Amino acid sequence: MSDNPIGPPPWLNAPPVEPYPYEETYDLRKGPDLHPALLGLLPYVGLWRGRGRGGFPSIEDFDYAQEIRITHDGRPFLYYESRAWILDEQSRPVRPAGREVGWWRAVLDAEGRGTDELEVLLTTPTGIMELHLGKVTGTRVEIATDAVVRSATAKEVTGGHRLFGIVEGALLYAQEMAAVGHPLSPHLSARLVRVGG
């Protein structure tokens, strides 16, 4: 007689499943239709690559390259993935730099329609999670931190502000950060061009 009267769960010996069956895309010409609540963010959907300059009061300025992928699967949010790498004076890669992943969520009204408000959740491999609140105004997105959560070993980041814009077809942004005892200060700015989508 078994010690477990319920028996094994049904998934224990089930056959393998097929790959994830739903398409996610940064190319609006294929895949699911963009959710109507995201129409204000349509210009951002794509694969972007470019260069930027970084700095902070506690570190030396640096040049970097970056790739940002903004995709959707038909639901009222965008998936955001960014990875950057440091460049030397000859624009050669030196080492990997910042990475983050997250979600840009449309705020819906009582009838389920999109508003111009946005919730952005971002996570880094350095132990920092941020919730930003913001607005979409034309092709401009402005967000600021509402909450920052960090692991015990992460650097002390207490706030941030980001401004994104689509300018002459390129994705431009500027990011400010409050961290390690410094108030909100310029941290990153870049210009990325669309390479996919």
Image (spheres, rainbow, N blue to C red):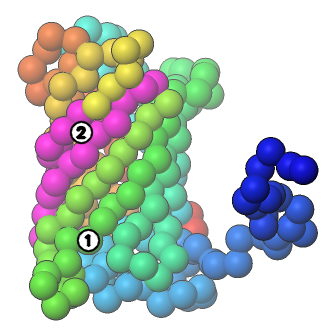
The type of residue carrying mark 1 is: Ala
Who's the residue at 82% across and 70% down the image? Answer: 17
Q: Is label 1 in a helix, a strand or a loop?
A: strand
Picture quadrant of residue 154: top left
Residue 88 x %, y %: 54, 21
**Disc 1 crowd, CA 10 A, few/some/many (<14, 14-19, 20+):** many
**Is mark 2 in CB contact (under 8 Å) with mark 1?**
no
Picture quadrant of residue 108: bottom left
Q: Residue at the far left: name it.
A: 183
Visible residue check, residue 193: no
Q: Tell which tag, 2 or 1, sits nearer the viewer.
A: 1
Picture quadrant of residue 195: bottom right
Give left or right: position of 31 versus 164.
Answer: right
The type of residue carrying mark 2 is: Gln
Visible residue check, residue 191: yes
Which residue, given by chain and number where applicable, does mark 2 sit on? 175
Quadrant containing the C terminus in the rendered view: bottom right
**Residue 106 disc label:** 1
108, above or below 119, in the image = below
Magenta stretch: give its range. Answer: 126-148
Q: CA distance from mark 2 to mark 1?
A: 21 Å
Considering only order in the chain, which callout, 1 or 2, is on the residue closer to the N terminus?
1
